Image (cartoon, helix red, strand yellow):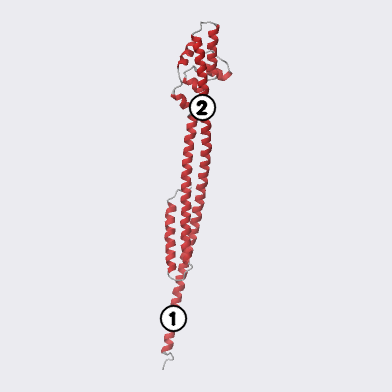
Amino acid sequence: MESNTTPGSEISVTQSQTSAQVDAASRASVELFELCAAILLGLGATLGSIAGYQGGLWGGKSIESFGQSSTITTKSADAGTFADSKISSDGLVKMQVMQLVSRAKFTSKGDERDFLLHQVSELMLREYSNEAYEALGLPAAPRKKYDSDGTLTDLPEEVIFEASKLDFHKEYYQWMYEDKVKHAVEARELFAEGQHQGTVGDQFSLDGVYYTMSLFFAGLGLVFKSRVRWGFLGLGTVIFLGALVYMCRLEWT
């Protein structure tokens, strides 16, 4: 029995099958590419948003630290100005004390001399700062009595004469500027912390740029229909992986 199939029809069927296989392979390739591109675009957009969020958090912390540093710097300046005024006042009081003590030394014992020494005691108890009073080694009891109820007690004559010979030692100035130095150190630490936070925020922002670049190249690959699209997708993938590694090495908040 003879077959009805002619050689021409067999060739046509073969070509049709081959064309169908090519079309199926082409569709599979397109679907695979689109799947890979969609995954990359989704991950890039998600991680890019996270990087932007982290950058915003670090930026906010940086601004807050700089603000606190500025406030404490003002406190440091105020403390320094207050210390300068106290030192100036103690210096003026010391000059008055020295003048009165000099007069008392050359005054015979009596009411006038007692009055001069009483004035010296009053100046020391009333006008000296706590730091100056302690720096000159004056007795604590009369000062505590004056601070508690305002009662003035004349200091012993020998104590007055000995204290008038002394000058304020270095620790006196350290005590005076203690608050200023403490605030200044705290302000510097906060400023350095703000700089660090700002740097980390900038690094997250830069990482967001990398994710955007990976999205750009992956999206650009969707425009092309030829094999070149895989090149763009590959480049976007490489940039994405680099951004991911960079992001994992950053400090998170």
Residue 146: give x, y in percent of width and height: 56, 18
Residue 123: give x, y in percent of width and height: 54, 17
Residue 151: give x, y in percent of width and height: 57, 16
Q: Is residue 250 above or below residue 212?
A: above
Residue 205 circle label? none
Q: Nearer the viewer, residue 151 or 119?
A: 119
Name the outermost residue toward the bottom: 1
Quadrant housing the N terminus: bottom left
Looking at the image, do the residues carrying marks 1 and 2 touch, with CB atoms under 8 Å apart? Answer: no
Distance Cα–Cα, label 1 vs label 2: 99 Å
Mark nearest the camera among 1 and 2 is 2
Q: Residue at x 47, y 42 (%)?
A: 193
Residue 249: give x, y in percent of width and height: 42, 51
Q: Is residue 44 above or below residue 148?
A: below
- Few, some or many C-alpha atoms within 10 Å of disc 1 (few <14, some 14-19, many ≥20)? few
Q: Residue at x 48, y 20 (%)?
A: 134
Looking at the rendered structure, the secondary structure element under dot 1 is helix
Q: Earlier in the sequence, mark 1 or mark 2?
A: 1
Identity, as a three-letter code, of the amino acid under mark 1? Gln
Q: Which image quadrant for residue 115?
A: top right
Q: Residue at x 52, y 29 (%)?
A: 81
Question: How many numbered marks appear?
Answer: 2
Identity, as a three-letter code, of the amino acid under mark 2? Asp
Q: Is residue 72 above or below residue 101?
A: below
Residue 84 circle label? 2
Name the outermost residue toward the right: 149
- Few, some or many C-alpha atoms within 10 Å of disc 2 (few <14, some 14-19, many ≥20)? some
User: In this figure, which residue is indicated by the disc labeled 1?
Assistant: 17
